[in-house]
Each structure stands twice: as C-alpha cells, then as structure tokens.
Amino acid sequence: MTAENIIWKDRFADRARRMNASEIRELLKLLDQPDIISFAGGIPDPALFPAVAIGEAYRSILSDPVRAAQALQYSVSEGYLPLRRWIAGHMAERGVPCDERNIMITAGSQQGLDFIGKLFLSRGDTALVTAPTYLGALQAFNPYEPHYDTLMPEGGNRTPESYRDQAAARGGRVGLAYLVADFANPSGETVSLVAREGLLDLADALGTVVVEDAAYSALRYDGVEVPALLALDVARSGGIERTRTLYCGTFSKTLAPALRVGWVCGASAVIAKLVLAKQAADLHCATINQMVMHQVAEGGFAAQVARNRDAYRERRDAMLAALARHMPEGVSWTRPEGGMFVWVTLPEAVDGAALLARSIEECRVAFVPGGAFYGEGRQDNKLRLSYSLSSPEQIEAGIGRLASLVARMVAGN
Amino acid sequence: MTAENIIWKDRFADRARRMNASEIRELLKLLDQPDIISFAGGIPDPALFPAVAIGEAYRSILSDPVRAAQALQYSVSEGYLPLRRWIAGHMAERGVPCDERNIMITAGSQQGLDFIGKLFLSRGDTALVTAPTYLGALQAFNPYEPHYDTLMPEGGNRTPESYRDQAAARGGRVGLAYLVADFANPSGETVSLVAREGLLDLADALGTVVVEDAAYSALRYDGVEVPALLALDVARSGGIERTRTLYCGTFSKTLAPALRVGWVCGASAVIAKLVLAKQAADLHCATINQMVMHQVAEGGFAAQVARNRDAYRERRDAMLAALARHMPEGVSWTRPEGGMFVWVTLPEAVDGAALLARSIEECRVAFVPGGAFYGEGRQDNKLRLSYSLSSPEQIEAGIGRLASLVARMVAGN
C-alpha cells in the first residue's frame, strides 16, 4: 500500500486542508529564529513557570515509596481524587458550588473539547461558534463532522427557531454552543453579563449544551470579573446537577502547560459519560502529573496567578500603547482585559496572510493571520497578536515595524 | 436541564451498557480489599517500576533551567524528537527499519487505538477483531460506530470477499483489522508466523490497515519470538513507507504506565494524519514525561525488561502449575509464552459471571468473566486470569480455592 492508496476518511483530508494547521506550525517554528519578533505563539512565558515548586513536588512524591507506587501506576479515568476536590473548591470560589463528582481531569482543556464533540456531535449536526473562534476547538470538533453556525452573543444572536431550522436544513440538530467567554482566543474580548444570560436563554430554548472554554479566565488584568456561564447557569437552574453548561478549565496558562492537566466541570451525569470517553481514549491522565499539580496548586496557586497577571498586564499595556502610537488610520483593535491576545482589523483591502509574508521578509515580525479562525465564512483582513512571550521593548519595536509596513501597504506600496 | 433530558448520542448510552465498563471498574476496586486474591487487574506490579531512575530523570531535567523551560512548555504534537529517535532504533531491533517520521508519541497504546478508529472508521464500517479481543479496543472504536466481524487468524479466516460482502451488507467497508499478536489480552495466545502472513494477505486483498497492538510484546518468557506484523509487512512490501500495518507500542508494561507514554509506528503518510488527530485531541503528550521516558529508556530499557520478565515468568509458571494441579476435568486454559493473562474455558454449563459472584462471596478470589471481550457474539464460559500482581504463594492459594468452587459448580452444587 502506498500512501496514495489509503482510503482516508474524507473529513481528515478536507478539514486538514481547510484549517491549514501545518502552515501555522511552520509559522510557530519561526520562534526559533532569534532575529524574529514573534507575536504568533500565544503560549505562556516559560520564565514564569513555577519550576522549583514543580521539581520539589516530583521529588517529594517519588521519594516516598508508597506515593511513588501510586504515582507510577494506572489510575481511575475521572482523575486523582485530591486534585478533583481541589478543583471543586476552586470552582466554588468562581461561583460554582460542586464536588468531585462534577469534575473530570483532562489532558488540558483541549481534550475536554474533543470528548464533548465526541459525545454531542453526530455527523451533520451543527455546532454554534463565535466568529472568530478558537482554531483548536474547530480542530477538535471537525472529526465528528459538524456544520457550523455563528453565535453573535453581543446582541446579534438569531432566534432559536432560526438556528434550529438551519441545523435541520443541514440534516441534524444543534449539538452544542461553544465559546471562550473571557479574553477570547483569538479576539481578546470578554462576553458581557447580559450576553451570557442571553446565551443561556438561547441554549435553553434549543435544548443544547453550552461549552465554556475558560482557558484564560484566571488571567484578568483589570476591569470587573464577569461570572462564569456555569455560575450563571447554576444560579438560574438551582444547582449544578440541573445545568447545561460544561466548563473546560486548565492549568496550562496558570501553572504550566506541559504536564497536560485540565478539567471539565458540569452536571455529574454528563461527567460520568465523559469519563467513559476518557477511559476509551487514553485510560487516564498521567497519575504523577496530577499529583504534582495538586501539590503545586495547593502550595501556591493564587500567588502564581498573581505573578502571571503582573507580568502579562505589563506586556498587554505595552502592546496597546504601541498600537495606539504606531498604527495608521483605518486600523482598529480590541482592548483585552486579560488573556494573551489582541485582535487587529486592517483596512479591508489588506490581506492578513499577504501582510504576514511581507512582514517576515521585510521587518522580521510574526503573527497569525485571522482567516483560519472561522467556522464558516472568513475574514482575511484580521491579525491575531499575542503579547505573552515578548518584553515591552520587543513589543514596542515589533509593533513599530509592523505598523510601518501596514502603512506602506495601505498606501499601495 | 436535568440529566434525563440530555440528548446523548445513542452510541454512548448503548455501548456503555453493552460493555459494562462500570461493572469491571467495581470489580477492580476489590483490589483494595486485603483478603481478596485478585487475578482481575492485568496491570503491572508497581514493585517493579524503576522509580529511582524515573525520579532521577525528573530531578536532572528540572534542575537545568534550559531543559526545565522546555520540559514545562507546549511542544509538538508528534512528540519529543530524541524519544521518537530512540523508539525508531527500538523498532529497528524488532525488524522495522524506520526513522522519527514513522513514530508518533501517544498517551499509551490506548490513545493510538482511539486515533486510528477516528481516522479509519466511519459509522457503519466494519472492524475485524479476534474473538475474544481486548475490551479497551472495542471501547476505543465504539464511538465511531463500527460493526464488528470476526478475525480467526489461525486458519479460520473467511475469504476476503466474504468479509467485504458482509461489511457492504451492513452499509460500509472493512475499515481496519485489529489484533494483539503477542500474548494477547485476554487470551494469552500468540499468533503464529503463518497466521500473520495470512492476515497480511487478507488485509492486502481487502485494502485495509492492520492494527498491531504490541502492548505486551516485550514480555516474552520463553519460546521463539515471532516477527512483528509490521516487520513482516516491511519485508514483503519493500519498506515501511509501503506498509499497511500500524504498530501500537507502549512503555506501560516495561517501564511504568502512569507517565502515559506510548507510540504508533507506521508509514509516515499515516503518521502525519495521526499527528493531526493528536493535535486536535490534546495537542501533545506531557513534554516532561516524554523527556523522562527518553532518559530512563536510554539508561536501561533492556535491563528493566529483563527484570520484569524474570518476575512475571515465575508468576506465570506458578499459575500454570496451580491450574494443572487443581482444576477439575472439563476445564481448559491457554499456555501463554509471555504477557499477563491466562484464558480459561469452563464447561459450557458454567457461566463466568455467576462463578465470579460466588467466588467473591465464597472464596474471595477475583477475576474478569470473559463475556465482555467480544465484538460480536459472546461466550460466557470464559475467564481471564492475570498473574501479574500476585506472588506464587497467592497464586497457588487462589487457584486452589477457585478450582474447588468450579468443581462444586460442575457437580451442580
């Protein structure tokens, strides 16, 4: 059999092309070139990782023979009980009273999206997503072959009937509604309280689940915290067991991504189904990493989050100031209250991908063009800029160079 | 929304009941009761884990700031390059010349099965599996809604046309053929060289992939090693890029399961597709665990495997001797040359699940009844016994007690 003869499932061949993941991967490799100022990554700064505390946790667990035997052995699919209890306490602080039965540990929040897609999306169903939306969510849902329809939480949502009719016309039902409510990837925007309530109304009317991707929620730098969709759902429905929201959390942006520890919080009946999916997919998350995350979180989660906030706030401020200082007229951008991203809208004639090609060549600045971040339709005059990995000085220099190039392109040069 | 109102995908509700995973989980909890002798688990003995080497690897990686930053950061979906190269060398020793492009790191071999199901099985397709087969493979494939047809590698395989026609009659095609070729879970049996070649012939005729689950392959205690299906495929097709076999390997049974590090080895074009599935599902395996596995494997994989073989060989011998000594006439069992399992056939009138209920109650011995290990049809007069976690003395005592009960049930008491 040669590769040409393999019968792929169409979904893989087509979706992979559409999403262009390999192009984005190529882009990320530019990070390794020292003269490139990259706003592409959107990953945490390793200088902020609590490496000492993590190392001490591995050491203490593995130097105790009883704990070492547990840490290296198979364990239950729902996750390490003390960690699930710690997370339940963390969720309670976010306005979601719950216990360990409401928590399943996943390999980052990304894996929660895969399992939720597996559980709620059949071929031909419709997933509601914002425009733009997190590329990784589209990648997680795509293998289950949904159609996409567009959520417009800030007042633009269509009627439930309209979403339902559109899904039915495409041969399925609305399987889920997905969004990053706080400091979204890629837009940086936060969904308002009113819009959150409206979204829950819509989901109630459609009888669908709401998937709340909370990857960045702990990283608020200013402004007023908006309650989590799951917290609002608990408040209106009378308890977590009656909610329809699945909250996908992670330690990737607060402690460190590479231990691959995240969670889903929701009604225990849904969690029990997701545990079956977890068991079938990879049995469980690395036992030792769950024990380490528990020890590190218990020892200083709040202090670590505060440290991250201080560092990223300074970079966000530097990027917003540089954009205001350097960008020509006709360019606009979002003003994130947290997270890692600013979403830039160029004049319509300027294509983000074309800008990137020239930017790498002429001014050695990298970013992600916006076209990939759409479930249906796409807008090509958008850029995602991340400030998480750059110093204020790099941000000032990089935005200055990028703005000059934009100005030249707007002027037709 | 209450749990009753959630629209599950039918596949989850139905399959979960059929597979009875929660019953098996309950069974495994019996391990915690000290007076139970359990042959149920089928998991490695934690006393054999190289905990010191693993601890030293975590320590050395995290105490070097550059390596620590890498170990705790996001990394590529295909896996840590030095580990992929080490595994490529390991595969070459198994008769599979390949390089890192032929290796993707997965969260145990289980995750390879999930991704292969995702890539090759559409709803209504047929997966060919042995009877019995690994329960976890059925769980991994079930969400993709295949039918199952039965592989009988040792001379009983039907014609390619017969498999193809049956799959077509069920509305799909043959998507894959799956087996554990060495010391299978649950049967303990090893597929012969002739049968392996026959299986590759069948797969050639059907144009389907062969999924070789090699979870136990390193644990041979005696007898002559049979070449891996992938090695035979390479030999006949002229190189790994022309093969149709996907080899799912793991460190779970040789080093330790809880770091969740396994791999898939195959043609690079297929690996590239599986990397897209990995990226969508959970981005990548824990970076730090991959680095640790690399260091531990490089430092002493062969010695660790030899240590495991010696320990498990003694237990296998004890179990086969105890079965021969104690079991009444009319009971037969397999004689594994490696791995962790013996598969027992009771007289037809004796139901394995009924035996388990009485065994727990009357003689405090646990095992897994065989009925769950079938893709279609099922045989209920079977037991899976694992010797991996018990001492020779426990094995002698437990099999003695179990055999007495079987004798009483055969006699109608």
Image (cartoon, coloured by chain):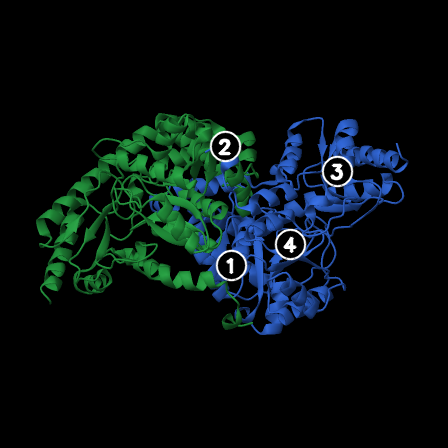
Chain colours: A green, B blue
Mark 3 near mark 2, Cβ–Cβ under 8 Å? no
- Label for residue B119? 1
Crowd rating for badge 4 (residues with CA inside 10 Å; few <14, some 14–19, many 20+): many
Read off the residue under disc 3. B353
Say whether marks 2 and 4 touch (CB < 8 Å).
no
Amino acid of disc 2: Ser
**Which residue is the site of mark 4?**
B217
> Would residue B293 appear left or right of A97 to someone viewing this image?
right
Mark 3 residue type = Ala
Viewport quadrant of the N terminus of chain B:
top left
Mark 4–mark 3 distance (CA, rounded to whole Å): 29 Å
Q: Residue at x 32, y 42 (%)?
A: A180
Q: Secondary structure at mark 4?
A: loop
Q: Nearer the viewer, residue A92 or A148?
A: A148
**Residue A328 in view, yes or no:** yes
Whichever of callouts 4 and 3 sits on the residue coming sooner in the sequence is 4
Tell me whether circle 1 and circle 4 mark residues in contact (CB < 8 Å).
no
**Residue at mark 2 to residue at mark 4: CA–CA distance:** 38 Å
Residues indicated by labels 2 and 1 sit on the same polypeptide chain: no
> Are the residues flagged by discs 4 and 3 from a single subunit?
yes
Between marks 2 and 1 in the image, the one whose residue lies nearer the viewer: 2
Of pointers 3 and 1, the one earlier in the residue sequence = 1
**Can you identify the residue that label 2 sits on?**
A268
Marked residue nearer the N-terminal end (1 or 4): 1
